Image: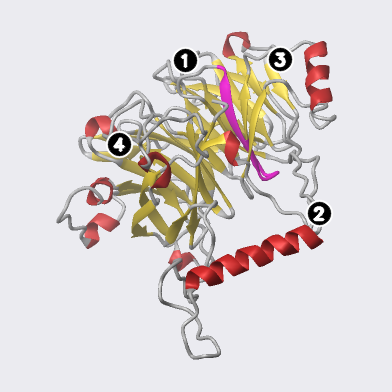
Amino acid sequence: MGEMEDIYDDEFDSDEEIFEAGSSGGEDNEDGDEMDTEQKALDIIEKDKSLEREDKQPVQSKVYLPNRSQLGPDEVMEADQSVYEMLHTVNLKWPCLSFDIIEDNLGDERRNYPQTTYIVGGTQAQKSKDNEILVMKLSSLSKTQQKDEEDESDDEDEYDSDPILESKSLPTPYTTNRIRVSPHAKQTGEYLTASMSESGEVFIWDISPHFRFFDTPGSVITKPMNKPIHTIKEHRGVEGYALDWSPFIQTGSLLTGDTEGKIFLTNRRESGWVTDKQAFLGHQGSVEELQWSKSEKTVFASGGTDGFVKIWDTRSKKHAPVISIKASNTDVNVMSWNSKVSYLLATGYDDGQWGVWDLRSFKPNTTPAPVASFDFHRSPITSIEFHPTEDSIVAVGSEDNTVTLWDLAVEADDEEIKTQADEANGDLEGIPPQLLFVHWQKDAKEVHWHKQIPGALVSTGGDGMSIWKSISV
């Protein structure tokens, strides 16, 4: 399926022989005796040093800035280890551009290494029949920041453990556009997961046995466990991307939206899953995002290709939006409610801009302005998410191959900005002071904060997944 990769380790092809210094492998010399491997390695190192002295000029590193920096023909992108506390990558057979982090029972506020995380994702395989729902356990995630000389920690495992990837798959005949785990899975012990497919069908899976398989010796997963427990067909073959579970209804309450502007509500009853026949209608175009309110049980927000953000109340018999706000002249791609300040909603657009809205200013027949707005990115915003505990921090993914971290609480006067720009030889000119961090992620698609590992994130793109933690947060 895939493999864990430490991007700072040397890479070797699988059919190459690798000898350790001092071992008895290697080529024969002219006398027929085996060449001493350790001496051979030392000779190679000395030769490389000599070539570097004679031919190489000192390498100058530069800061990469999205939409501003361009790599030259002989330039390569390398992560600066000193700014990461943790950084690991997962290479997958097929792109997995939508995923969710599964809450586990290993405890909250986990700050000690090595770390473990569980993830579920849906693939975008070249052939439909090869698609899967993947349940993964990533363990032995060590610190990747280099030790300081002053670091007196004796726990070498924090730095030296090799990452481990384990996975189980559930076959699905379609590409997965969006996948989400019920927020009540940890509390109920039932790990309900919804996936919206390109076929227009929404599958509800119970991945409980797959999640427990990794940590329960002797577990067996039977064929029926690999099938969805329910399929929502009300979208009638119309593709969709919007999907969200209610944070209030533990039994299961799911919103789904499609490219024709229809939003359906599905609830779990004693008799099974029931989808309302009447759709919520109001968008003139595709519904790109749905987000249940974090504080109001019956309220949700939607964003669409018509550039509108709409607020709805499921109690309304009209199934029409309560409030509509024109947020952008382009698509509203993604949204995120603030978990700590319930009236704040972050939105990201197709023109690369993103903003934060105060819903207290959302009133009928008015056009409020966002409380914060940024145009740092020049490519579509593909993901946005408020930090789960820090109400001013936001993670933003963009098609410009980056995930950026922002602190809205930061303020800087003109003199301070000028000083920072001068110290960076002009590289930071025009950079918003709220920008904390830039993480390279090719074709960045989704990013999620890990609620149980403070400051850690998982992001995905065209070249796989990254599990990382910046020293900035």
Quarter holding the N terminus? bottom left
Rate crowding at label 3 as few (under 14), some (14 to 19) or many (20 or more) other CA atoms within 10 Å: some
Which stretch is magenta?
A: 392-403
As drawn, the label of residue 369 is 3
> Foreground: 221 or 369?
221
- Residue 124 spot, x, y in % from top left: 52, 58
Contact, CB < 8 Å: mark 3 with mark 1? no
Asked if labels 4 and 2 touch by Cβ distance under 8 angstroms, the answer is no
Residue 278 vs residue 377: left or right?
left
Residue that carries the numbered disc 4 in the rendered image:
104
> Residue 33: in sight, yes or no?
yes
Tell me which residue sits at (29%, 30%) in the image.
107
Instruction: Name the residue that disc number 1 marks.
Output: 340
Look at label 4 and name its amino acid. Asp
The local secondary structure at tag 1 comes to: loop
Q: Amino acid at mark 1?
A: Lys
Q: Which mark is residue 57?
A: 2
Q: Percent position (x, y) of residue 346?
A: 59, 24
- In whole angstroms, how far apart are the C-alphas of marks 3 and 4? 39 Å
**Label 3 or label 4, whichever comes before in sequence order:** 4
Nearer mark to the viewer, of 2 and 4: 2
Task: Measuring from the top left, give residue 60's x and y in whole percent.
Answer: 78, 45
**Local SS, label 4:** loop
**Residue occupying image coordinates x 51% and y 49%:** 465
The span from disc 3 to disc 2 (Cα, nearest Å) is 52 Å
- Secondary structure under badge 3? loop
